[in-house]
């Protein structure tokens, strides 16, 4: 069993791919240099699609109303539907598939351990804290106050808890004062893995998908409040599908 598996980080084989998409191209150079324009809707095979009414999305958009040419970071895959929805409202959108990036990072670390068996191992560099710091420094390179809004989805439920906590701190720095975060949390460990895309102002499409990484933790309200302690406003919406939508305003 590899060291990362001992830490509770287990993934299947991943196919390398570009995880970031920015539409339109940024004019101020704030986004990743390897971002590539989206050319069509992101699709994964054999997806089961349902829809859900989203009060959290409705309030998220209400808080962004009147912002004008804002910037938004979507931490899921680059769905053309979601990109177009926000671009038509004047936003400059960056998609950065955080779970895919994390899965690739973990696979790379496992490969390094296997291909360098004779090298003395520095276990301090592979603690959850060290791995989280290394991952974020390599994959979340946006400058402070780069974005007005973040679509976090249910990403935190699938990140190793130490990484989830550090990721929130990093994302908070990237968000401008008054910026808004839309997130979701499972009330129990999810049986299926889903992706989400915005259909209209009150509707999300929920797409069943092949798991990228296993679910790591079910967060209680107190733990969520502690992670987002720097935000001045927090609001939750409890759904019947065991998903809690949350809105955070910095």
Image: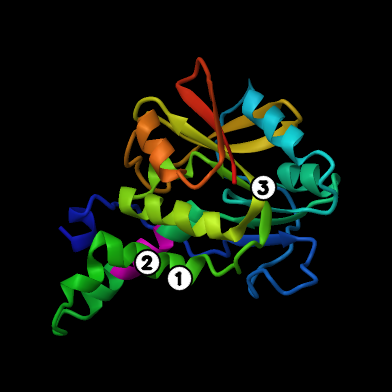
Q: Residue at x 24, y 50 (%)?
A: 8
On screen, residue 48 versus residue 14, left or right, reads: right
Taking depth in this image into account, of 192 and 244 the one nearest to the observer is 244
CA gap between label 3 and label 1 equals 24 Å
**Tag 1 and tag 2, C-beta contact below 8 Å:** yes
Residue 137 image label: 1
> Residue 210 location, x and y as percent?
46, 41
Q: Residue at x 73, y 37 (%)?
A: 63
Q: Mark 2: which secondary structure? A: helix
- Mark 3 and mark 1 lie on one chain; the one further toward the N terminus is 1
Q: Residue at x 17, y 71 (%)?
A: 123
CA gap between label 2 and label 3 equals 26 Å
Q: Is residue 104 magenta?
A: yes
On screen, residue 230 versus residue 85, left or right, reads: left
- Mark 2 and mark 3 lie on one chain; the one further toward the N terminus is 2
Residue 133 image label: 2
Determine crowd level at label 2: few under 14, some 14-19, many 20+ residues with C-alpha closer than 10 A: some
Nearer the observer: mark 3 or 1; the answer is: 3
CA gap between label 1 and label 2 equals 6 Å
Magenta extent: 103-109
> Residue 113 location, x and y as percent?
23, 73
> Residue 81 location, x and y as percent?
74, 42
**Residue identifier under label 3:** 178
> Residue 95 location, x and y as percent?
64, 55
Taking depth in this image into account, of 21 and 186 the one nearest to the observer is 186
Q: Mark 3: which secondary structure? A: strand
Report whether residue 219 is seen.
no
Determine crowd level at label 3: few under 14, some 14-19, many 20+ residues with C-alpha closer than 10 A: some
Q: Is residue 28 above or below residue 191?
A: below
Q: What is the count of numbered marks?
A: 3
Magenta: main secondary structure equals helix
């Amino acid at each position: 069993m590899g060291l990362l598996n001992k830490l509770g980080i287990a993934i299947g084989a991943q196919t390398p791919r570009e995880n970031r998409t920015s539409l339109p191209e940024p004019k101020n150079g704030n986004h990743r240099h390897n971002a590539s324009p989206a050319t069509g809707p992101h699709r994964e095979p054999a997806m089961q699609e349902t829809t859900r009414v989203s009060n959290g999305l409705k309030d998220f958009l209400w808080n962004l109303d009147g912002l004008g040419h804002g910037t938004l970071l979507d931490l899921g895959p680059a769905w053309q539907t979601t990109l177009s929805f926000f671009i038509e409202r004047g936003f400059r959108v960056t998609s950065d598939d955080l779970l895919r990036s994390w899965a690739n990072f973990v696979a790379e670390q496992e490969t390094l351990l296997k291909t360098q068996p004779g090298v003395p191992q520095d276990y301090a560099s592979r603690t959850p804290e060290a791995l989280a710091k290394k991952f974020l420094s390599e994959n979340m390179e946006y400058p402070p106050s780069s974005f007005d809004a973040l679509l976090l989805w249910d990403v935190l439920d699938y990140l190793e808890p130490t990484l989830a906590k550090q990721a929130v701190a990093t994302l908070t720095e990237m968000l401008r004062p008054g910026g808004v975060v839309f997130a979701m949390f499972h009330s129990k460990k999810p049986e299926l893995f889903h992706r989400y895309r915005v259909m209209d102002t009150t509707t999300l499409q929920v797409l069943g998908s092949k798991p990228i990484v296993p679910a790591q933790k079910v967060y209680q309200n107190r733990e969520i409040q502690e992670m987002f302690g720097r935000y001045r406003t927090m609001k939750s919406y409890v759904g019947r599908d065991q998903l809690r939508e949350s809105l955070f305003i910095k």
